[in-house]
Amino acid sequence: MLERLRGLLLGGRKNLFDPKIHHQLALIAFFAWVGLGSDGLSSSSYGPEEAFLTLGSHTHLALYLTVATVLTVFLISASYSQIIELFPSGGGGYLVATKLLGSTPGVVSGTALVVDYVLTISISIASGVDAIFSFLPHDLLLWKLPIELVVVVALTGLNLRGVKESVSVLMPIFVAFVITHVVLIGYGLMSHGTAFGSMIGDTMRDTHSAVQELGVLAVVALFLKAFSLGGGTFTGIEAVSNSTAMLREPRVVTGKKTMLYMSLSLSFTAGGILLCYLLAGIGHVPGKTLNAVLWETLTRTWHIGGFGIGHWVVIATLLSEGALLFVAAQTGFLAGPATLAAMAVDHWVPKRFAHLSERLVTQNGIITMGLAAIATLVYTGGRVKILIVMYSINVFLTFTLSQMGMVRHWWETRATQPHWKRRFLLALLGTSVTGGILVITSVIKFGEGGWVTLAVTAAFVGACFLVRGHYQQVRGVLRGLDDVLSDLPFAERPTTPDLAPDGPTAIILVESYAGLGIHTLLSVQRMFPKHFKNFVFVAVGQVDSGQFKGTESVQALENKVREDLERYVELGQKMGYYSEYRFTLGTDLIEELEHICLDLSKEFRRTMVFAGQLVFQRETLFTRSLHHETAFSIQRRLQFAGMQVIILPIRVWAQTSR
């Protein structure tokens, strides 16, 4: 019953061996725009508002703000299009900083991205609920936070079903947002078209008066403050470069097309909303978002046959706005786990974050992002003003590191790149703009919540170094085994041993051809001298996010597993035993091993399973979280099925006792 319920909620198992599976799961540019671009597009629901309100009474600066916003959108998009071209396999800010600046800037960028995507989920859902509550009675506000938490849980479950399924379900919401906002912004601009000339003149006069009254530096400082605090508008642009692995081939072309869609839609929406604020003379109304006030102002005179439709248009628009903000949270669920998976491959976070579920999604990453978003919403009470400050800092930290890496790349390759100057200047300008926003936002909003983001990111970076240090210690132990055991001399046998069908058979679970597997084989021989007649080496090629990038990667993994097992068979034969191997590819290591061992128990009459397991001198929750206790898990399953399983320990001493 539980399996059926799980299948109903999460969907059936994906066929890993289907040659068309990558094509079926990959996103075309339009779907990528929906799944990844919704974060950037939805930021127009709160980014322009934050910037406009910061101007206070000096709303004339909104015209300059509009121009700066549109230019910055295209600047960052163009810069990230270069990153897609240079790193088509994905990884985005983490991979760029790691490859071009070094491992430490890389892990800082990666952790900043993960925290940022948690905040993407949190602020998108909080803003979406705010938009919906803008036309609901104030008495219902106490339900706002519980509803936000329910939405997080629902989106987590939806993403566990798979990337394409989640995007397809949410696409109508995205389309509804685009249509309503294009119509309203277009109407707002055209209905005030005659005011454009006078607006420019008024802006010049008001700016001149402000300069005389406050001074040039004060006006520039106010503009930069508004521009920086409205930096949430630019968030989400980087999501495509972080997630190119899920795009349809050719990935570079698809990625660049998606970036174009994002830049055009975001610049029109954010820039258009800022202009409409200025043209319509919009001001803050308690209990309502600035966008809600704008839509009400624009549609106040809309009638069809004497029936006022403006109110219903506003409700439909705010519903689409709120719903799109829920879709924007999708970016966090798509790109966040992808970044965690890339960091897991490099051993900065537990390796389980790179593992795929039977639905071929990074399940551990999705669940972690959902839980972290729930904790963030509870901590902040779902207040957007706090979340937007926490949100804007990390994304610009990643922007700056990524573009700084590109600056270094174009400078170092200038001798071989014909158009390096243009690209170098573009990356340098992008670094200056995003770095400036980062510094201003961090300084101004440090005491209003910015310190929380910086503290959490710093703690995350420290945890990453602890994790990697542990993995390096374990690799040192295994490397010592490899050095001792991998090149053991064995005399060649004149004949290959024959199968003994009724003889005792040792099933040895191995991974790659390395010291751990050889140690297990030698331990079996030492513990049971001349007892076993047959040896069967069993391995599962675990397909994780590192391999699941195309048919070629999966085929390379299969070839590697087969080659390693053939070396084990050769070693067993040299030792005088009949040897063969069994293997498969899969995402669930324990389940696949169980199936193979149960099949072998039917083929060979007297079997015993052996598995090597790392055993730490000081077992802690930290060490258990970083290692799959595969041997103990398979032992429990097979012993319940009636098979004998023996675990052979590989000791890992604490560093202080060595």
Image (spheres, helix red, strand yellow):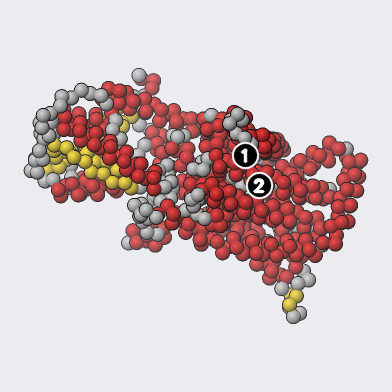
> Relative to 438, is 574 on the left or the right?
left
Toward the viewer: 626 or 559?
Answer: 559
Q: Is residue 350 left or right of residue 56?
A: left
Residue furthest bottom as drawn: 305
In the picture, residue 199 is in which quadrant? Answer: bottom right
Which residue matches tag 1? Answer: 399
Question: CB under 8 Å between callouts 1 and 2?
Answer: yes
Q: Position of residue 509 (x, y in %)?
A: 24, 38
Could you tell me which quadrant the N terminus lies in?
bottom left
Viewer can see residue 636: no
Helix, strand or loop at mark 1: helix
Callout 1 amino acid: Phe
Q: Residue at x 73, y 56 (%)?
A: 273
Q: How many marks?
A: 2
What residue is pinned by disc 2? 234
Name the amino acid, label 2.
Phe
Q: Residues within 10 Å of mark 1 (few under 14, many from 20)?
A: many
